[in-house]
Amino acid sequence: MGDVEHYFTAQPATSDERRTIAVHLAGRELRLETAGGVFSPDHVDHATAILLDEVPAPPASGDLLDLGCGWGPIALSLALLSPDASVWAVDVNERALDLTRRNAAAAAVEVQAVLPDDVPAHVRFAAIWSNPPIRVGKAALHELLLRWLPRLAPGGAAYLVVGRNLGADSLQRWLVDELVPMVLPGAAVDRVTSARGFRVLRVLAPPDGPAT
């Protein structure tokens, strides 16, 4: 069974045997729960670590989104850094959502870990942080970003970490040439950093808000 079938199905077929790992997030040492059938179950993967190290602190308030949350390291970091914000963690993998909820409780933070269709349509995000699921394929990835990036609040920023060898530069060109003209006219796209084989891309919504 390939990675896509493991990570991007509602009910992974791999074993649900739970394990505990020690991680360092937002200045805190935490012991969190992971399991097979979710992305990078044994540690915070390199791409996510780069995202957490390189992007500016999230807004102190508003709605914040971890898109493709896995077992929750990005969502937990957002909640730890911005305790007065409303943090959403979205995934199609129900095992991942269960782990994120358990880990939020262990870290004593509030995270709403839900399926994509369970995010109310009116919610707009002051920030979106994501290690997006590149291996779902280009068409599915573009569909995902076309769905969520237009939900940035006016002046909100999305940060996406993508491997250079997994198409970071072509994704940046697609964001500029296609996504922005289609659904985010006036938005800016740039590269925040390039480190250890990964790019962090930023999509900054215009101050008067994206097209809807």
Image (cartoon, rainbow, N blue to C red):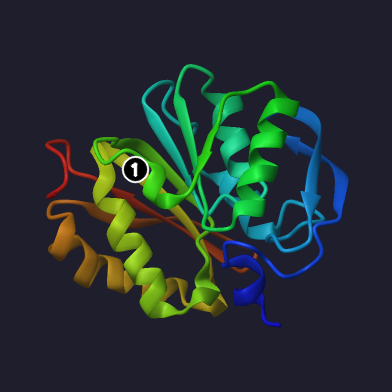
Nearest to the observer: residue 122 or residue 86: 122
Q: Identify the residue at horizontal 23%, vertical 45% (top origin).
A: 205
What's the amino acid at mark 1? Ala
Q: Identify the residue at horizontal 23%, vertical 65% (top origin).
A: 179
Residue 72 seen from this side: no
Q: Is residue 150 left or right of residue 148?
A: left
Q: How many marks?
A: 1
Q: Outermost residue toward the top?
A: 84
Q: Outermost residue toward the bottom?
A: 1
Nearest to the observer: residue 34 or residue 178: 34
Q: Quadrant of the N terminus?
A: bottom right
Residue 173 point in image, percent of width and height: 30, 73
Q: Identify the residue at horizontal 64%, vertical 51% (top origin).
A: 96
Residue 202 point in image, percent of width and height: 37, 52
The quarter of the picture where residue 23 lies is top right
Q: Which residue is mark 1?
A: 157
Q: Is residue 2 left or right of residue 122?
A: right
Residue 34 seen from this side: yes
Residue 24 point in image, percent of width and height: 77, 37
Does 176 appear above or below 97? below
Mark 1 secondary-structure assignment: strand
Does 41 appear above or below 62? below
The quarter of the picture where residue 46 lies is bottom right
Does 146 appear above or below 29? below
| Residues packed near mark 1 inside 10 Å, few (<14), some (14 to 19) or many (20 plus) | many
Q: Identify the residue at horizontal 67%, vertical 66% (top origin).
A: 12
Q: Is residue 121 left or right of residue 62?
A: left
Q: Is residue 154 left or right of residue 144?
A: left
Nearest to the observer: residue 126 or residue 95: 95
Residue 13 point in image, percent of width and height: 72, 70
